[in-house]
C-alpha cells in the first residue's frame, strides 16, 4: 500500500477516534431518556452546537497536523531512508543517509551509515583482492585492445548472426570514409558493437563465404575465404574471412563455428591504377605494332633496293622518321602516366628529420665519394616524408653540383621556422643561374646508374613543400633549401572527443555478443539488461515545439549488452534556419555562427533515425525531445516507432519518495559526474549512466522487462506532462 493511502486511512481513523466514542455514548444516553428529557437535551445541545462543532473541527485539524508531521518524520522519512539504503547497496555506495528527523530516526540513520562504512571497507578489501587476481587477465585484454586499435588493417569480428562484437580503429575510420547518404552526417558508417555487418557488406556474399569455409573445414583444408564486394558508394572492398571456432565438446568432435573474423581492404584506388596501367601498356603495345610494321617495311625497301629513286627513297625515310617520332611520343606519354601512378602510391610517414639527413649523407658519400658535414641540426624535428624519394632528390642535387661545379664538400643544415622545417644543402663555390636550377627541377632524376621518371619538382610537390635556391654572399656559399611541413598528429574532431570520453581502453569489443541472438523487432518481454539502447538529447531554440522552436543539436550514445559505448556516438549541430533566441544562448552555449551552414533537420533526422534503428530510445523528460522529433518526421520522411523510456519517469518509479527527479538531482543522488550540462552529447552520456544505475534499482522493485518498465512509467504523475 502506498504511503499516501496509508496517510488517508490514518486520518479516517483519527476522525473516528475523535467522534466515535461521543456519538456512541450520546446514542446510548438518548435511547435511555424519556421524551421530556430528550426535548430539553435537544434544546440545550442546539444552543451550544456551534461551539462544540468549532472545538471538534479545531481538535481534528490539530490532530491531522500532528499526524502529518509524525507521518513525514517517521513514515516518509523511513521510506526515504530505505530508498537511500538501496542506492547505497547498488547504485552509489558513497551515498549516505541524511541525519534528519526526530532523534530516534537520526540514531537509525547513524547506525545505517556506520554499517555502510563497514561494508565499504570490506568491499574495498574484496575489490583489492579481486583486482590483484584479475591483473594478468586485464593486462591481456589491454594488450588485445591496444593491438587491435593500432593494426594497420581494418579488422571486424562478428557472430554467426552478423552482429559486430569487435572492430578496431582502422575499421571505424575506413567505413566512416565510405559512408554515403544519411550515414555520412554526424555518425559515419553504421559500424558499432551489436550492429549488423550486413548494413556494410552484402549478406549473400558473407553467407557464401561461410559455406566455403565450412566445406574446407570438413575436408581438412585451411579455413579461409576471400571475396570482393561493392559498397553503396561504388567502392571495391577485398574481404578475407577466417572462422572463430568453439572448443570441442568431446574428443574427436568437430568444433562448431561461432563467428568469423573479417579483414577489409579498400582496393578501389589500386584497381583504378592497375586499369590505367593496363590501358597505357595496351596503347603502347597496340600503337607500336603498326609503327613497327611500317618501320620494318620502309627499312626493308631501303635495304633491298639501294638504287631506288631519290624521291621514293625520301618518302621511305620520311616514314621512318614519322613512325619513330610517334613511338617516341607514345613512350614519353607512357612514362608520364607511369610517373603519375608512382606519385599516387607514395607513402608519407612521420620520420625524424636527422634520420633523413644521415641517410642522405651516407648515399652521397657512397655513390659520389663526396665528403659531407652537418651544422645547426635540430635533432627533435619531425617531418612527414617518403624517405626514399627525398634522399634520392638530395643525392641527385649533390650529383648535379659535383658534375657541373666540381664542389668538394656538401654540408647539411636542419632548422625549424613555425610550421615548416628547413633542410638545407650547402656548398661553397660558383653561383648558378635560375635557368639551370629550373632545368634541374624539371628533368627526370638519375644517380649513379639509378633512374626514375620522377622529377625534383614532383618530389617536392608530393611532400606539400617547396625548394628554394639562395646565396650567402658574405660567406661565399649557396644552398638549396627544402621547405617541408612539420609532422603533426592527424587530428580529427570525432577522435579527439572520443579520447576525452574514453576513460580507459577503447570499447571496441564485447565477446559476450557471441551469444547475441538477432531479433529484428524489439521484444517488450526481454530483460532491460539484454536490450540495445540509443540514449539521446536535443538542444533547441526554446521550450515550445508547437509554436515554432527548432532543434539546434542532437546528441546520442549507444548502450549494448548493459555497457555504455562512449565511442559510438551521434553528435550533430543543426541549422534551424532562423535566429536563436538571445536568452537561450547562455544556457546551451550554441551561437548563430556555430549553427549557420550546418545541415538542416531534414538531413540530420534521417541520419539519426538510421543511427538508432532497431534500438530502444532513452531520454530524460523524453516527452519534450520526442515532441520535437515528431513534428519533423513528415518533412524528413522518417518515423520513430520504437519504444521510448524516460529516465525522469523511471527515477520516479525507483525513488517515489524523493523530492526532485531533475537530471541534476538524479546524477547527484547516484554519484555520477557530469562535466557539462545543456550540451546534447554530454547530457546523453549522463542520462545513459543514470539509466544503467536505475536498472538494478528497478529490478529490486520487480521491474525487469521492457514491458514492465513502460507500464510502471505510465502510472507515475510525471507521465501526464504533455508538450
Image (spheres, helix red, strand yellow):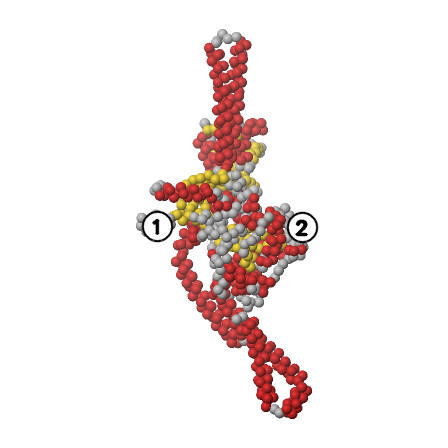
**Residue 406 vertical placement versus 240 (above, below):** above
> Is residue 73 visible in this depiction of the protein?
no
Numbered-mark total: 2
Residue 248 - label: 1
Question: Where residue 468 sits: x, y (%)?
Answer: 57, 34
User: What residue appears at the point 59 percent right and 48 percent down from the top-left corner?
Assistant: 637
**Dividing the picture into quarters, in which one does residue 42 lie?**
bottom right
Residue 43 - label: none
Farthest-out residue, left: 251
User: What residue appears at the point 50 percent right and 33 percent down from the top-left corner?
Assistant: 273
Mark 1 vs mark 2, foreground winner is: 1
> Is residue 304 visible in this depiction of the protein?
yes
| Of residues 452 and 99, the one drawn nearer to the viewer in this rendering | 99
In the displayed structure, does residue 593 sit left or right of residue 689?
right
Residue where numbered disc 2 is placed: 578
Tell me the crowding category of disc 1: few under 14, some 14 to 19, or many 20 or more residues within 10 angstroms, Cα based: few
Q: Which badge, 1 or 2, comes first in the chain's sequence?
A: 1
Question: Where residue 447 sits: x, y (%)?
Answer: 47, 29
Amino acid at each position: 500500500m502506498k504511503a499516501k493511502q496509508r496517510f488517508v486511512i490514518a486520518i479516517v481513523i483519527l476522525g473516528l477516534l475523535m467522534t466515535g466514542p461521543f456519538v456512541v455514548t450520546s446514542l446510548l444516553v438518548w435511547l435511555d431518556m424519556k421524551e421530556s428529557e430528550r426535548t430539553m437535551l435537544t434544546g440545550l445541545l442546539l444552543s451550544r452546537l456551534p461551539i462544540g462543532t468549532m472545538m471538534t473541527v479545531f481538535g481534528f485539524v490539530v490532530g491531522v497536523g500532528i499526524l502529518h508531521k509524525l507521518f513525514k518524520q517517521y513514515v516518509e522519512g523511513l521510506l526515504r531512508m530505505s530508498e537511500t539504503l538501496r542506492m547505497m547497496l547498488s547504485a552509489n555506495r558513497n551515498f549516505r543517509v541524511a541525519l534528519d528527523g526526530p532523534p530516534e530516526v537520526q540514531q537509525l540513520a547513524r547506525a545505517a551509515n556506520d554499517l555502510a562504512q563497514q561494508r565499504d571497507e570490506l568491499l574495498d578489501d574484496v575489490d583489492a583482492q579481486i583486482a590483484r587476481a584479475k591483473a594478468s587477465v586485464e593486462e591481456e585484454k589491454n594488450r588485445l585492445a591496444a593491438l587491435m586499435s593500432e593494426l594497420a588493417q581494418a579488422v571486424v569480428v562478428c557472430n554467426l548472426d552478423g552482429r559486430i562484437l569487435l572492430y578496431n580503429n582502422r575499421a571505424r575510420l575506413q567505413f566512416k570514409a565510405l559512408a554515403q547518404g544519411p550515414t555520412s552526417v554526424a555518425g559515419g558508417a553504421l559500424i558499432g558493437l551489436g550492429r549488423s555487418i550486413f548494413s556494410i557488406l552484402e549478406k549473400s556474399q558473407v553467407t557464401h563465404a561461410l559455406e566455403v569455409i565450412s566445406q574446407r573445414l570438413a575436408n581438412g583444408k585451411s579455413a579461409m575465404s576471400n571475396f570482393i564486394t561493392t559498397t553503396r558508394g561504388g567502392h571495391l572492398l577485398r574481404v578475407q574471412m577466417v572462422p572463430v571456432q568453439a572448443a570441442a565438446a568431446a574428443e574427436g568432435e568437430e568444433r562448431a563455428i561461432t563467428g568469423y573474423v573479417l579483414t577489409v581492404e579498400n582496393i578501389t584506388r589500386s584497381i583504378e591504377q592497375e586499369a590505367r596501367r593496363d590501358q597505357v601498356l595496351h596503347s603502347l603495345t597496340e600503337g607500336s605494332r603498326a609503327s613497327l610494321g611500317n618501320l620494318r617495311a620502309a627499312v626493308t625497301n631501303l635495304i633491298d633496293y639501294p638504287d631506288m629513286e631519290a624521291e621514293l627513297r625520301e618518302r621511305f625515310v620520311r616514314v621512318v622518321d614519322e613512325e619513330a617520332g610517334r613511338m617516341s611520343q607514345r613512350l614519353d606519354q607512357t612514362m608520364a602516366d607511369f610517373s603519375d601512378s608512382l606519385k599516387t602510391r607514395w607513402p608519407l610517414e612521420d620520420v625524424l628529420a636527422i634520420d633523413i639527413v644521415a641517410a642522405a649523407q651516407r648515399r652521397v658519400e657512397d655513390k659520389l665519394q663526396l665528403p659531407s658535414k652537418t651544422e645547426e641540426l635540430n635533432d627533435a624535428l619531425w617531418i612527414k616524408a617518403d624517405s626514399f624519394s627525398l634522399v634520392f632528390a638530395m643525392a641527385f642535387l649533390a650529383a648535379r653540383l659535383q658534375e657541373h661545379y666540381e664542389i668538394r664538400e656538401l654540408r647539411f643544415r636542419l632548422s625549424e621556422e613555425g610550421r615548416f622545417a628547413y633542410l638545407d644543402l650547402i656548398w661553397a663555390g660558383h653561383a648558378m643561374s635560375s635557368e639551370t636550377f629550373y632545368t634541374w627541377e624539371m628533368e627526370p632524376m638519375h644517380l649513379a646508374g639509378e633512374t626514375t621518371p620522377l622529377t625534383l619538382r614532383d618530389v617536392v610537390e608530393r611532400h606539400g613543400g617547396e625548394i628554394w635556391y639562395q646565396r650567402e654572399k658574405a660567406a661565399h656559399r649557396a644552398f638549396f633549401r627544402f621547405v617541408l611541413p612539420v609532422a603533426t598528429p592527424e587530428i580529427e574532431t570525432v577522435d579527439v572527443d572520443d579520447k576525452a570520453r574514453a576513460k580507459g581502453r577503447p570499447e571496441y569489443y564485447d565477446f559476450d555478443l557471441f551469444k547475441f541472438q538477432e531479433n529484428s523487432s524489439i521484444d517488450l518481454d526481454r530483460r532491460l539488461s539484454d536490450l540495445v539502447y540509443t540514449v539521446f538529447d536535443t538542444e533547441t531554440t526554446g521550450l515550445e515545439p508547437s509554436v515554432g522552436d527548432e532543434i539546434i543539436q542532437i546528441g546520442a550514445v549507444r548502450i549494448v549488452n548493459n555497457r555504455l559505448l562512449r565511442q559510438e556516438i551521434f553528435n550533430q549541430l543543426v541549422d534551424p534556419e532562423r535566429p536563436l533566441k538571445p536568452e537561450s544562448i547562455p544556457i546551451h552555449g550554441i551561437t548563430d555562427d556555430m549553427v549557420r551552414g550546418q545541415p538542416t533537420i531534414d538531413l540530420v533526422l534521417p541520419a539519426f533515425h538510421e543511427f538508432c534503428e532497431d534500438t530502444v530510445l532513452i531520454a530524460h523528460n523524453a516527452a519534450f525531445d520526442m515532441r520535437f522529433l515528431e513534428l519533423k518526421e513528415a518533412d524528413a520522411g522518417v518515423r520513430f516507432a520504437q519504444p521510448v523510456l524516460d529516465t525522469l519517469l523511471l527515477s520516479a518509479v525507483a525513488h517515489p519518495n524523493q523530492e526532485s527527479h531533475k537530471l541534476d538531482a538524479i546524477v547527484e543522488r547516484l554519484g555520477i559526474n557530469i562535466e557539462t550540462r545543456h550540451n546534447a552529447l554530454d547530457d546523453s552520456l549522463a542520462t545513459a549512466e543514470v539509466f544503467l544505475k536505475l536498472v538494478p534499482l528497478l529490478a529490486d522493485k520487480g521491474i525487469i522487462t521492457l514491458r514492465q518498465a513502460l507500464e510502471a512509467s505510465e502510472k507515475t504523475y510525471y507521465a501526464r506532462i504533455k508538450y
